[in-house]
Image (spheres, grey):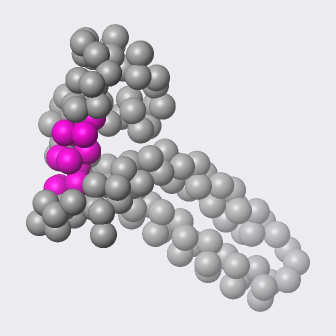
Amino acid sequence: MNFFKEAEHVLRNRPKLDLALGNLRIRHDRLISCDTGIQENALELAVVIGCIKETELKIKEIDGVLTQVTGEHRTLIRKWYFESKTKEVIMEELNIGGVTSLYRQKNNAVSCFTMLYFGAAGLNY
């Protein structure tokens, strides 16, 4: 398993978890207010509630690890993966001299996250 790539996958998809959580809550509210098919709705509602809990836990887990990442690395991760800023904008905002330096710093930030998220296994990427 390539833990570095897995960490990038986690970071890249973190913003989508917020969207998913909003969609799940909308479905939850619709099922609560629906009068038809009580047994069918109850089963779907149980599944949706489970998905909400799982999504909230994953968000909390990722965000908890991110709080442990150093400030500069955390800022770079947020701009790159969460805010989807262009390389040029990130370099300007963070005062980074070139694309090579940006990639080096981004890889260092992801390596830090990888180690904190996967533990010792993250050393072996």
Q: Is residue 90 above or below residue 14?
A: above
Tell me which residue sits at (65%, 55%) in the image: 23
State the image quarter where residue 72 is shown: top left
Tell me which residue sits at (41%, 54%) in the image: 9
State the image quarter where residue 46 is shown: bottom right
Q: Residue furthest front?
A: 100
Horizontal side, residue 42 vs residue 102: left or right? right
Residue stretch rendered in magenta on the structure: 106-116
Horizontal side, residue 44 vs residue 17: left or right? right
Q: Is residue 66 above or below residue 25?
A: above
Residue 109 x/y as whole percent: 22, 39
Residue 125 x/y as whole percent: 21, 60
Q: Is residue 66 above or below residue 75?
A: below
Tell me which residue sits at (13%, 60%) in the image: 123
Residue 114 visible within the image: yes
In the image, residue 22 lies in the stretch drawn in magenta: no
Q: Residue furthest bottom?
A: 39
Dominant SS type (magenta): helix
Horizontal side, residue 80 vs residue 22: left or right? left
Residue 63 x/y as whole percent: 31, 49
The number of discs equals 0
State the image quarter where residue 99 is shown: top left
Residue 33 x/y as whole percent: 78, 65
